[in-house]
Amino acid sequence: MKCPLCGQAELVHTTRPETYTYKGETTVVADVTGDYCSACEELITDAPETERVMSECSRSISK
């Protein structure tokens, strides 16, 4: 499937660390699984994975 955001590349299902920044705070979440676009570097995750990432980011940034 082509990336729904940029339409430039096929999505590749992968697990990788992802860096997130929120309000100037940066955290790395290990083992994020989703569909990655090599053209725009977007990672599209399913609902359970998105909730896990959000929870980990919230815990990390609120420390």
Image (tube, rainbow, N blue to C red):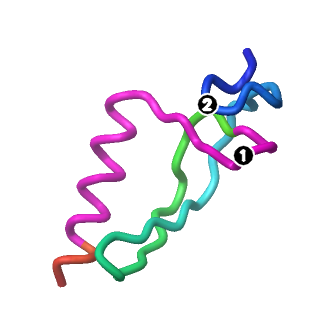
Q: Check whether the beta carbons of the residues at disc 1 and disc 2 lie within 8 A of each other.
A: yes
The residue that mark 2 highlights is: 5
Residue sitting at x 57%, y 36% = 34
Relative vertical location of residue 31 with respect to residue 8 in this rendering, above or below: below
Earlier in the chain: of badge 1 and badge 2, it is 2
Q: Quarter-wise, where is residue 48 in the image?
A: top left
Instruction: Please state the horizontal and vertical placement of residue 35, each as a whole percent of the image.
Output: 63, 32
Relative vertical location of residue 31 with respect to residue 9 in this rendering, above or below: below
Residue 63 among those drawn in magenta: no
Label at residue 23 = none
Residue sitting at x 35%, y 82% = 24
Count every numbered label the image shows and give the total.
2
In the drawing, does residue 31 fall left or right of residue 20? right
Relative vertical location of residue 49 with respect to residue 9 in this rendering, above or below: below
In the drawing, does residue 47 fall left or right of residue 40? left
Mark 1 residue element: loop
Instruction: Please state the horizontal and vertical placement of residue 49, each as a whole percent of the image.
Output: 39, 38
The residue that mark 1 highlights is: 40
Neighbours of disc 1 within 10 Å: few (<14), some (14-19), many (20+): few
Residue sitting at x 74%, y 20% = 2
Instruction: Please state the horizontal and vertical placement of residue 9, each as a whole percent of the image.
Output: 82, 30
Mark 2 residue element: loop
Q: Amino acid at mark 1?
A: Cys
Please provide the residue range marked out in magenta: 37-59
Q: Amino acid at mark 2?
A: Leu
Neighbours of disc 2 within 10 Å: few (<14), some (14-19), many (20+): few
Residue sitting at x 75%, y 31% = 12
Instruction: Please state the horizontal and vertical placement of residue 4, each as a whole percent of the image.
Output: 62, 23
The CA distance from mark 1 to mark 2 is 8 Å
